[in-house]
Amino acid sequence: MASKETILQTKELSKDFGALIAVNRVNLDVGVGVHSIIGPNGAGKTTLFNLLTGFLKPSRGEVFYQGRKITGLQPYRISQMGMARSFQITSIFPELTVYENVRIAAQSRLKARYNIFTSFEKLKGVHEKTQSVIKQVGLTELADLKAKNLSYGFQRGLDIGISLATEPNLILLDEPTSGMDREDTKLVIQLISVISKKMPVILIEHNIDIVLSISDRITVLHQGTVLAEGTPLEIQKNDKVQEAYLGGY
């Protein structure tokens, strides 16, 4: 039974690729704060994200968002309901400025978004929303810079900003610090911490130090199955997790 704080829930969620069971009867109950999904390569983490966001249809099981069944809905429908996702590879428009990238996402939520005869300057609230999001992700001074000229860390921050501009109630981040140096990683961790105070965050992250420091709850996947779930301290002390993933961390 989902709690009042639950925003996303799965019941016996499974995905088969022929004889391979990539996700096997996964039950999630996501509430406030940062809920991290960890596990070795091939554990089923990204497949699970694809099931949650509609990019894959489950073989069995159900997905519920804000109490509503969303199993099998198209990704754009799920996005319109308030679930946003960033991918391992950034989805920015490299030739557009930071401002333009965020503005397009903000405009996508307006009823007049498809009216080609409406100037975006006349769309109520778009400019203000764009500026607010850019400030939130720490890119105000770089708003007029083309996205391709940002550092990798700032590009990831912009990617998250694009997700935030769609006004989500839940955001899913797929390895947001992958390939980053220490300083860029620090910026993204700070951003995730700020976001998690306003909405739940589901995080896939390979860096266990980051996961243990930032998470409120952790689900460990192993061969597509939930091996363990709990607080960072509980996960650290779990013998099965030690053996399968943390390696005596």
Image: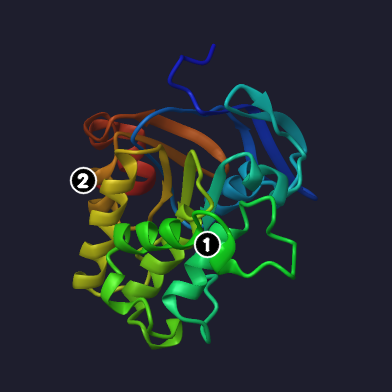
Residue 157 in sight here: yes
Q: Label 1 amino acid?
A: Phe
Where residue 91 appears, as percent x and y from the top left, is: 55, 70
Q: Is residue 75 above or below residue 187?
A: above
Per the rendering, the mark at residue 247 is none
- Using the image, determine if residue 144 lies above or below residue 13: below
In terms of image quadrants, where is residue 132? bottom left
Relative to 22, 124 lies left or right: left
Which residue is pictured at 46% across the width and 81% down the height?
A: 97
Q: Which mark is residue 87?
A: 1
Kindly tell me whether residue 104 is visible in this rendering: no
Q: Is residue 161 above or below residue 213?
A: below
Q: Amino acid at mark 2?
A: Ser
Q: Which-is-in-front pick, marks 2 and 1?
A: 1
Between 214 and 243, the one nearer to me in the picture: 214
List the residue tagged with mark 2. Answer: 213
Determine whether, in the image, residue 25 is placed left or right of residue 182. right
